[in-house]
Amino acid sequence: MKKVAILQSNYIPWKGYFDLIAYVDEFILLDDVQYTKRDWRNRNKIKTRRGEQWLSVPVNVKGKYYQKINQAEIDGTEWQQSHWRVIKENYGNAKFFHEIESWLEPLYKDNYFSHLSKMNREFIEAICSYLSINTTISNSSDYELVEGRIDRLIDICKQSGATEYISGPSAKEYMDDKLFVSNNITLSWFDYSGYSEYSQLWGEFKHDVSILDLLFNCGKDAPDYMRYVKK
């Protein structure tokens, strides 16, 4: 039995994203599809003393030009210093800030990222490493791709040897489970509900922020507030 999830890459995703990675045997970044503006691909939220704040990576998108996520180029490097400054200003007093800083700061200060997809993967893999998530991570472009939204997912599953495809609940409106069944693949839905609250800075508790919030506040105890990441 092999469980696979296929999802677009996000910038410093929330904790549920990493729970899904930990739950499956292979997590495939769907980066050969169209890049969408004002989405999670290039931005995420953190908590600040002034409320939730977006951290957005500038991407070169010209007009209505069609480009895939893995073709999206990052515009400049100034954002790296800016993002780290905002993170440090708002989490510098968090209990585990210095522990996370030791491996997170170099990602912002010692790297040059030309493409969004590669940058997202590096951050995702660094966070997985800290959480000891050993799931295989690959790109959809590693596989032979066919046309069609659902057909592509099924074909990637078949090529990867998956017997079960784990999908996020938002896909229920367009997913056809009969197509998966006819290809001997079980379609299951991931449940993001039921997360416990932890000691969080800056007012009312928020679940929908980057996992960095959980890491800064809880360190190696972060799995206690997740469902499938083990300590």
Image (cartoon, helix red, strand yellow):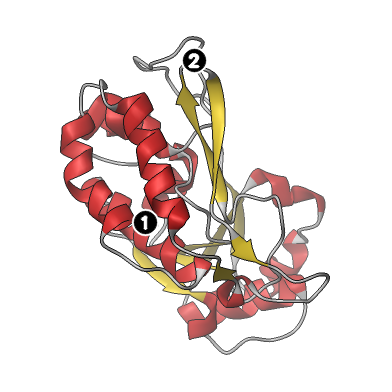
Q: Residues within 10 Å of mark 2 (few under 14, many from 20)?
A: few
Q: Is residue 161 above or below residue 130?
A: below
Disc 1 to disc 2, C-alpha distance: 24 Å
Q: Which residue is more in the foreground, 32 or 47?
A: 47
Q: Residue at x 32, y 27 (%)?
A: 91
Look at 63% across and 86% down and name the residue there.
Answer: 145
Q: Position of residue 105 (x, y in %)?
A: 26, 48
- The residue closer to the viewer here, 23 or 108, is 108
Label 2 SS: loop
Q: Amino acid at mark 2?
A: Phe
For the residue marked with disc 1, what is the amino acid?
Phe
Up/down of 193 relative to 23, above or below: above
67 relative to 117 in the view: left or right: right
The reply to whether residue 226 is visible in this rendering is no
Q: Is residue 35 left or right of residue 130?
A: right
The image quadrant of residue 120 is bottom left
**In the depicted view, which residue is nearer to us: 107 or 40?**
107
Residue 167 visible at all: yes
Mark 1 lies on residue: 123
Q: Residue 29 bears which disc, if any?
A: none
Q: Residue furthest bottom?
A: 144
Rendered image quadrant of residue 169 = top right
Coordinates of residue 25 in the picture (x, y in percent): 38, 62
Residue 104 in picture, x, y percent from top left: 26, 48
Q: Residue at x 33, y 54 (%)?
A: 108
Image quarter of the N terminus: bottom left
Query: In the image, 149: left or right of 211?
Result: right
Q: Earlier in the sequence, mark 1 or mark 2?
A: 1
| Picture coordinates of residue 21, whole percent (x, y) | 42, 53
Residue picked out by circle 2: 205
Residue at 21% x, 21% y is 95
